[in-house]
Image (cartoon, grey):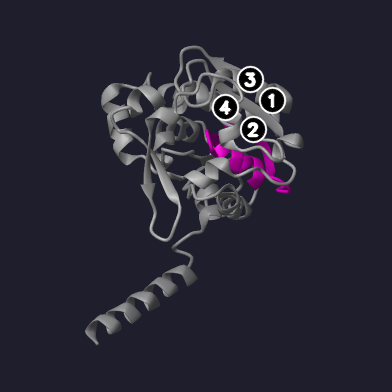
Amino acid sequence: MLRTTKSRVLATAVAAVIAAGVLSPVVAQAHGGGSHQAEPTVVLVHGAFADSSGWNDVVQRLQNHGYPVVAAANPLRSVAADARTVRSIIDSIDGPVVLVGHSYAGNVISAAATGEKNVKALVYVAAFLPDTGESAGELSNKFPGSTLAATLQQVPVAGGGTDLYIDQAKFPQQFAADVPVRKAKLLAVSQRPVDAAALAEPATGVPAWRSIASYDLIPGADRNIPPAAQYWMAKRARAKVVSVPGASHLVLASHPGVTAELIERAARETK
């Protein structure tokens, strides 16, 4: 009885706080509670084997330059479901959005932004730009060079399905070869798995890059998605490309300045 009473009191208190406007939705956090916003909101979406903290150094640079930022938690369960999650964040923001996706999240933002009129630019970071019917797995194997498959560990999920992780011992070289080793090892431990089915899931509908200005940051030493595949996708999408020679798949962590500069360029050029 005591536990039930405490739960009711807590629920009542939370409801009162929300009603009073103390707990703000994403839109208020991003836009200062409805005040005039000079810059678009940047929505960052992490890919497989990562989490939102990978964007930290990029976030700091963007915030220092006056950009409101939301780092979305990508569920990594399926392209369609993940896109719905990101779309709900986009819909909560009052004003223009620059939508950024790393790796597998390229599939997600290509679906999430379709029909979203406030998304002014798409920025792909070592990412997939799929067309209708294409999957991440198919695109990563379109050109030789990916060594990801040999580093993966499979973990069966209760109720069906399989989660994929990168072997922690292999993570630094495979995913983050130009990130300091000590940091790369921490990222290996905190990586989030992707459902194997998501990597094989074909894109449906018309991809957003067909109608929204696109930018692409391509690392020259990517071992997950071959650079040749990234250039091929970027050319097809008529994306504006910035290359980073020698950079790993986790270019957003090893070159946060270059990453932030491209995002800001996209924001300026699509105002």
- Of residues 11 and 49, the one nearer the viewer is 49
Specify the label residue 231 is tagged with.
3
Marked residue nearer the N-terminal end (1 or 4): 4
Q: Are marks 1 and 4 in contact (CB under 8 Å)?
A: no
Q: Are marks 2 and 1 in contact (CB under 8 Å)?
A: yes
Residue shown at the point (24%, 87%) measured from the top left: 1
The 10 Å Cα crowd at callout 1, few under 14, some 14 to 19, many 20 or more, is many
Question: Would you say residue 9 is visible in this rendering?
Answer: yes
Q: Give the distance between the C-alpha atoms of the residues marked 4 and 2, in whole angstroms.
A: 14 Å
Marked residue nearer the N-terminal end (1 or 3): 3
Residue 182 at what x, y percent from top left?
A: 26, 26
Residue 83 at what x, y percent from top left?
A: 59, 49
Q: Indicate yes or no whether the magenta region holds residue 268.
A: no
Q: Give the distance between the C-alpha atoms of the residues marked 4 and 3, in whole angstroms.
A: 14 Å
Residue farthest toward the top in the current orientation of the protein:
245
Please report the bounds of the magenta region as a residue range: 101-124
Of labels 1 and 4, the one closer to you: 4
Specify the label residue 141 is tagged with.
4
Of labels 4 and 3, the one closer to you: 4
Label total for image: 4
The 10 Å Cα crowd at callout 4, few under 14, some 14 to 19, many 20 or more, is some
Quadrant in which the C terminus appears: top right
Residue shown at the point (53%, 26%) measured from the top left: 225
Say left or right for 168 vs 84.
left
Q: Which amino acid type corresponds to the residue marked 1 in the rendered image?
A: Ala
Residue shown at the point (66%, 35%) measured from the top left: 130
Of labels 4 and 2, the one closer to you: 4
Height in image: 237 above or below 74? Answer: above
